[in-house]
Amino acid sequence: MPIDVVRSGDSIWNISQQYGVSVRRIIAVNGLESPGHLLTGQSLFIPDAEPRYTVRPGDTLQTIANQFGVTVNDLQKKNDLTSATDLYAGKRLTIPLLYHQVQSGETLDTIAAQYHVNPQAILQTNQLENPNNVYVSQILKIPEAAKPVIDVNAFQTEFGVKGTRPLRDAAYDLTYNSPFAHRMTASGSLGEIDDEPIVQTDLRDRVAPMMAITNFSSTEAGSDLAHSILNSEALTNALLDNTVKMMANKGYRGLNIDFENVLPEDRNAYNGFIQKAASRLHAQGYFVSSSLAPKTSADQKGLLYEAHDYPVHGKYMDFVVLMTYEWGYRFGPPQAISPINQIQKVLEYAVTVIPRDKILMGFQVYARDWKLPHVQGQQAETFDQQEAIRRAVEHNAPIQYDQAAQSPYYRYTEANGQQHEVWFEDARSAQAKFELVKQFGLRGISYWVLEYPFPQNWSLLRDNFVIHKL
C-alpha cells in the first residue's frame, strides 16, 4: 500500500513508471481532477501492481498459469495472447491476481478456508451481495489474507433520492449508515426527515440502516431540551415509544443516541436513559449505539464532556462512536481538524473503560479554509477534500504536512491579498488513522459525513481492512 508524496518535477507519468501501475488507475483511485498539475507535497495512494513474469525456455501457458494459480484463459486475456505461438522466451507477461473457479459442492466458506481468507473479503473483493449466490464455474478473485475485519459506519446529512447517490458508491465499504438526524421535540416526538429512500438503498445493498436521534441543531445547543426529556419519565417513555415506532415503520435495524451539550447535573439522568433505551430496544431485536464527546479523562470538565459517562455507555451500548474530530473548530483558529496526537489521547483513556470491540473511532472527511490573520469568532469555510485540492491547484500552493498532527495543510493568497490556511485529509493522514484502529484493536471507524467525496479514503480503507457486513 505505497503512498507517494509528490516531489518537485514529478509527473503522473514518471510516478506510474516508478510503481508499474497505469496512469489511468492512479488517476481513478485518487480522484485526480488535474493529473497534469500535481502539487509538491501532494500524497497519492498507489494501488498494488499486478505481478510480472518473464517467460523462460520450456514455459507454456499452462505451466505459467499453474505456477501462479490462475487460469490459462485469464492469462491470455490479460496479455492479449491469441494463441500459444505468441509465447516466447524473454516475453514479459502480466499475471492477473489470484482467481478461483468454483467447483461442484464448493461454498463461499469452503473456498475462503482453502485460501485462508475471510468469506466477507471474497464478497467484498468481487462486489457480491449474497454469499449464497456462488455457482459452479464462477470465477472469483481471491484477496490477500490476514486483513483485520472491522465495522464501518457513515453518517449523512443529505436525504431523499439525492442522498442515495453517495450511499450507492460507498455501500460495499459500509456496515452501517445513519441519516442524521431525527431531532427530538419538547413533547417527546421526533422531527421527520426524508430518509425512506436511504433506508431502502441500505437494505438492498446489505448496509444496516441506523436511525439517529439528537437533541441539538445547527442553531440550538439543546441543553434545555435534554434536561426536560431526561428528567421526565413521561417524556422519556414518549421519546422511546416514538423512536421504536418510527424504526419499525421505516425499516431501521438499530439506533444511535446523540445527546450533546447535556448539563453536568443531568449526567445521572442521561445514564438512566441509556440503560432504559438499551433494555427497551434489545428486547425488540434492535442494536443500540451512542455518540460520545472525545474525552481524555473521567473528570474532564466542560459542557460537551461531563454528562458523557464512558463506562456506562460501554456497559449498556452495543457500540459507541467517539466523535474524535473538531479540534479545528470552524469558529476557532486554524489547526488540524482531527490531529492524530489528540485522537490517541482519547483512545488511551477510552479503552480503559470501554471494551475495545465496542469502539468506533470518528473520522471526519471534510476540510476547512480559514482567513488569515484569524479573528476570534470568524467562521471558517467547510468543504470536501476534492475542493481542498482544487484550491491548492488553483493557487499552485505546495502541500505541507504536520508530523505531530499527521495532517496536511497549505496556505494561499487571493488576488486581493487575502491570505488563507487550509487543513484537510489525504492518503497519509487516513493511513495514520487506520493504524490507530489496528494499534488499539478497535471495532472500527465512523465517518462524518458520507456526502463529502474523498476517493483516496475508500481505496485505502479496502487495502487495510475487510468490512464486516451484518
Image (spheres, grey):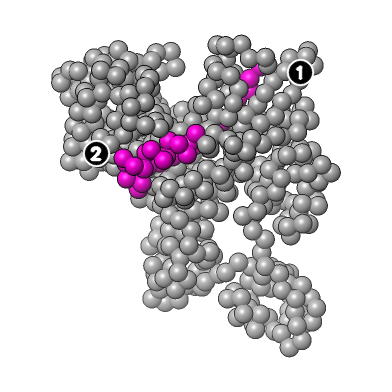
- The amino acid type of the residue labelled 1 equals Glu
The kind of secondary structure element at disc 2 is: helix
* Disc 1 target residue: 414
Q: Is residue 232 visible?
A: yes
Q: Which residue occupies 43% across, 35% down?
A: 346
Q: Which residue occupies 63% across, 74% down?
A: 73
Q: Is mark 2 in CB contact (under 8 Å) with mark 1?
A: no
Point out which mark residue 316 bears. 2
- Check residue 360 for magenta coloring: yes
Percent across and percent down for residue 185 are: 29, 16
Quadrant into which the N terminus falls: bottom right
For residue 423, what is the image quadrant? top right
- The amino acid type of the residue labelled 2 equals Tyr
Q: Earlier in the sequence, mark 2 or mark 1?
A: 2
User: How many numbered marks are there?
Assistant: 2
Q: Is residue 374 left or right of residue 147?
A: right
Q: Which residues are magenta?
A: 342-371
Please determine whether, in this image, residue 214 is positioned above or below residue 338: above
- Check residue 367 for magenta coloring: yes
Q: Is residue 151 left or right of residue 92?
A: left
For residue 454, what is the image quadrant? top right
The kind of secondary structure element at disc 1 is: loop
Q: Which residue occupies 78% across, 13% down?
A: 416
